[in-house]
Amino acid sequence: MVFPFSPPQIPRAATEKPRFLMKFLVIDTGIGFEHAHRLHQDGNEVYYYINWQKPFPKFEDAIVGMGFGPNKVLTFGNLIEKVDWIVFTDVGYGDFADFLRRKEYQVFGGGAMEKMELDRAWSQKAMRKYGIPYPDTKIVNNINDLRDYLKKSRTGKKVVKISIFRGDLETFIYDGQADTDIQILQIEAKLGPFKDSFQFSVEDFQEGTEIGVDTWMRPDGTFAVPYFVTLESGMNGSTVGRWVEKCPYWHDILVKCGQIASNFDYYGPLRLEGFLDPGGAVKVTDWTIRPPYPGSMIFLDVLKDYGKLISSGAKKVEISASEYCACGNYFSDYGEDRWNVIHLSKFSPPRFRRAVISDHVFYSIPGSDLIATVTAADSKPEGALKKAGKMLGKIEVNGGYYDSDLAKSFPNLSVIQK
């Protein structure tokens, strides 16, 4: 199946013949095209597929990444036996990824380990079995039980989460105020007749510093080093982190995570999020069995060779940057609803969320207020954040906005400097 028009091509000199290192098929949901782009930048032949299929497919969903170099494809079945690696950049294809592994195809990402992200009740049982600390949690099985439990709770604020369907409900903090009661009513309306059988996870609210870690797990349960210890801002989605060989907060937890990963023969990215208490202990709140977005744009800019990392079994993480890295985000009020020309001052293009290149012009595609992410590195976290904020000022889009002072969102930078 082909696109019903001639896709724009990046010009190549008439005498130049492409010499590809490896062939990759990247299977995506539309959020991770920059991973396909980076593999192409490394000199690989890349086929990039987005699951565009709906009862009424949208052109704008299928063409993300057009013009950036990877071969855009509408189907992928005929490519599986023609590529060296199949890469999954999001969850949702777990059974298929494991089927391919059983057939001895080389697969990066995806697999049954997605349950750790998509099934919170199951994830908590696994963490309890392997001694991974997590907040006290109550699983409730319908909207009325959720409402009753929250009203009767005597232990302060609660964090309400669901499994899988984040498009219907993002995590929110219940504090008994009117606006959070309204949120529950909105959830009830969305669930319709299933409100009486839908499962919710309710965690005790955690005081302390929210902290994360990113690495790549190997099928034997070991993990790549250095790994990336991060702080994230809920204000602007920015990230700052440090590449370390051994983090006192996370290392023992990662070892236990490896025991879980080895049960699934999992090979691919892993992100954990949790809260660090004053005593230096982390309680894990979330698993991500995929690259984090937009934080993984940092990896794409600092890894020396992304394709080599994948094909080598993540034996060694080689980065071409200082130990502290940060990213900042550029948004547009019009990003959800309209096409926008992206104007860039003279600097290396940022990483994009939903974009195409046509006639050498960058366009954002409707569907996200997040337009682009810039990354920077420095010997100090404050320096990396300052550089990223300055770079955001070199982007211009209609209705655009960004936070130039990223450091103010991170009052606890000392946490990642230990």
Image (tube, rainbow, N blue to C red):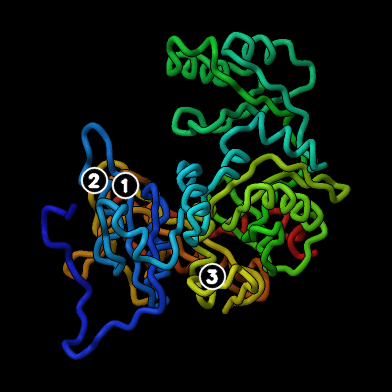
Q: Residues within 10 Å of mark 2 (few under 14, many from 20)?
A: few
Q: Earlier in the sequence, mark 3 or mark 2?
A: 2
Kind of residue at disc 1: Gly
Rendering coords of residue 109 (x, y %): 52, 54
Rendering coords of residue 69 (x, y %): 29, 69
Q: Residues within 10 Å of mark 1 (few under 14, many from 20)?
A: many
What is the distance, in whole Å, between disc 2 and disc 1 at their CAs? Answer: 6 Å
Q: Nearer the viewer, residue 15 or 111?
A: 111
* Disc 1, SS: loop
* Disc 3, SS: strand
Does the CB distance between marks 2 and 1 fall below 8 Å?
A: yes
Say the numbered circle drawn on residue 146.
none
Say the numbered circle drawn on residue 338.
2
Kind of residue at disc 3: Ala
| View extreme (bottom): residue | 15
The residue that appears at 31% across and 66% down in the rendered structure is: 70
Q: Is residue 11 above or below residue 274?
A: below
Q: Number of callouts in the render?
A: 3
Q: Nearer the viewer, residue 210 or 385?
A: 210
Rendering coords of residue 388 (x, y %): 51, 66
- Say which quarter of the image contains residue 239: bottom right
The residue that appears at 67% across and 36% down in the rendered structure is: 123
- Kindly identify which residue carries mark 1: 335
Is 65 placed left or right of 109 in the picture? Answer: left
Does the CB distance between marks 3 and 2 fall below 8 Å?
A: no
Q: Earlier in the sequence, mark 1 or mark 3?
A: 1
Kind of residue at disc 2: Arg
Q: Is residue 196 above or below residue 224?
A: above
Q: Quadrant of the C terminus?
A: bottom right
Q: Nearer the viewer, residue 82 or 341?
A: 82
What is the distance, in whole Å, between disc 1 and disc 3 at their CAs? Answer: 24 Å
* Disc 2, SS: loop
